[in-house]
Image (cartoon, grey):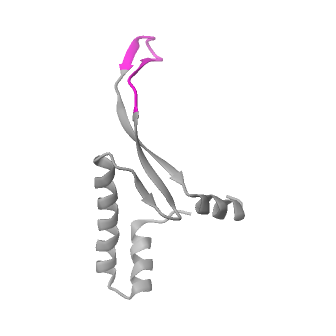
Amino acid sequence: MTITKADMAQWLAQEIGCSKREAKEIVNSFFEELKEALLRGEDVKLTAFGTFEVQTRQARQGRNPQTGDTVTIPERRTIRFRPSQALRILTRAYGR
């Protein structure tokens, strides 16, 4: 099942009784703040859902499979999601 931002906004509008436009702004603001925090290098913890962690992957040597040439893959930052214990229990209960 895929949940889009539009689905989230529709659900939010129904739950709190605001307009769809306002709900869409709330959802977009949430994701914008999440993105900004991760760009600053901060970890973001959502209770009962999980944690988004910023990790730095070290530079390493790689190989071009077509030519066999050795290339340097530069250091980069990635995001790792670690589900909370509550989310893990929930997904196990539903067999996913």
Residue closer to the observer: 20 or 31 = 31
Based on the displayed image, in which of its 4 quarters is residue 29 positioned?
bottom left
Task: Quadrant for the C terminus, please.
Answer: bottom right
Please name the residue shown 43% across and 47% down the image: 53
Q: Can residue 68 be found in the magenta stretch?
A: yes
Give coordinates of residue 56: x percent, y percent. 39, 35
On screen, residue 36 above or below 59 = below
Give coordinates of residue 81: x percent, y percent. 49, 50
Give coordinates of residue 72: x percent, y percent. 36, 18
On screen, residue 63 above or below 92 = above
User: How many callouts does the rendering have?
Assistant: 0
Please name the residue shown 59% across and 61% down the image: 87
Give coordinates of residue 36: x percent, y percent. 28, 54
Magenta region: which residues?
A: 57-72
On screen, residue 7 above or below 87 = below
On screen, residue 13 above or below 51 = below
Please name the residue shown 44% across and 72% down the image: 7
Please name the residue shown 40% across and 67% down the image: 5
Based on the displayed image, in which of its 4 quarters is residue 55 positioned?
top left
